[in-house]
Image (cartoon, helix red, strand yellow):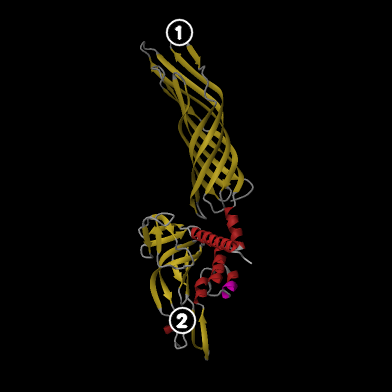
Amino acid sequence: MITRSAFTLQIFIVTYFLLCHTNIIAQSKLYKPVNFVTREGEHKKGFTAEYTNKRNPDEFIIFKNENGSGDTLSLTPLNTSLVEIIDYEFYKSARVTLYNNLLNLDQTTEGALEPSEIQTIFLRRLIKGNRLSLYEFKTDKKDHFFIEDSAGNMETLRYLKYFGQQQQQTGIIEKNIYRDQLSLYIKDRPELFDYLSKTRFKSNDLINFVQRINTRSVIEENVSKELKKKIFFLFCSAGMVNVKATYLGLSNNVKMIDLKSAIEPYFAAGGEFVYGKKSDFFSDFTIGIYPFSGKGNYTFTDVYGKEITNTYELAYVAEAIGATINYKVINSPITKLSVGIGFNLVLSSYSKNNYTTTNTNPNGTIVILDQENLNKSGAQYFAQMQYFLGKRGAIQFMYAPKQDFTTYSKANLSQSQLTILFKYILGKIR
């Protein structure tokens, strides 16, 4: 037998449980964060409680604060473009045609069975895809479905079901026009036509089929991987280089001396890295070697009437280690032309670095050897153009503008460079 005190305790426990449960339910109904875009293109944020099973609301009430307090804003299809309830649903405002045909035994003509109306409404997105996105609009009478292509064009999927005559028989007739509409997106996917013939005008069926459209076939995947495959192959180059060096004296007696040089040979080898079979970008990594030998003089008459000739001689062998980034500005089956920019690390070994002064003084010729070392390494920037000859060959033109070679205490040495090479691909071809 339950005593009065025990009964009171039970009532207290039940009441306490109900209050706690009610409080938990109340707390669980939090306002969800919302991102939305106005018709004017403004991106804004807020909070809403309109996220239950209300699939196609006419409006969203947006609160400023997370607890539902503060200023409110009404979002309708007329003043809002997009509404995203974070981690829940996505709606898009669109002006679409709704076909409200119903199965009505009193209507026997097809024209009377498909009344349509144009409305601006919120469409709920069921699936987002790279080729097609699927949207839904539910009413008490019918579920409407819409597809949107990658360009943003929205189309209403049509489905008719009515009572009429077909092939001299009276009964329920279905016209799956939506299958004809979807077939336009699988012309290159014959394996999907069987799935399409079994796809019903229901959300789950349409979601599954649109997912198949957005999923590439095995053949497409293999082709895509092949096109994106990065290619690396070796090449060798040979040609000529013309280096123009200038010795500029900083004193009154030593003026600019241009070093006259012959055309020198240039040899190189390296690798070409292509970013994909259909890519117009590629990079060259090269090691080249070339010699240089130049001589120049400057003659003047001093204040005593004596003729003085200053002569400068320079000779070296250079190794250029560099890379270029190239882009094919013309990439047709007949003509291929690329332009690029590059950087070289130049390592030089000098065999001659002489400065000579000759005059008519009875003492004869005075030879002054420059005691300061030239730079043994330096950076070189250049522009490059390649004209492709078939699949294996190319003619390369490289020009490095005038850059300081070294700076002395009494003079400055700089040079520019023009290189023409024939490039030959080894092994793999383009």
Extreme-bottom residue of the structure: 168
Residue 362's label in the rendered image is: 1
Q: Is residue 67 above or below residue 365?
A: below
Q: Is residue 194 magenta?
A: yes
> 10 Å neighbourhood of mark 1: few (<14), some, or many (≥20)?
few
Instruction: Give x and y (percent) for residue 373.
Output: 53, 20
Q: Give the quadrant of residue 71.
A: bottom left
Q: Is residue 223 above or below residue 207?
A: above
Extreme-top residue of the structure: 362
Q: Is residue 77 above or below residue 236?
A: below
- Secondary structure, mark 1, is loop
Q: Residue at x 42, y 61 (%)?
A: 82
Q: Is residue 180 visible?
A: yes
Gap between marks 2 and 1 measured at Cα: 121 Å
In the drawing, does residue 365 fall left or right of residue 303? Answer: right
- The front one of 93 and 139 is 139
Q: Residue at x 49, y 15 (%)?
A: 368
Amino acid type, callout 1: Pro
- The front one of 59 and 257 is 59
In the drawing, does residue 71 fall left or right of residue 375? Answer: left
Residue identified by numbered label 2: 102
Q: Is residue 187 visible?
A: no
Per the rendered image, the range of residues in magenta is 193-197
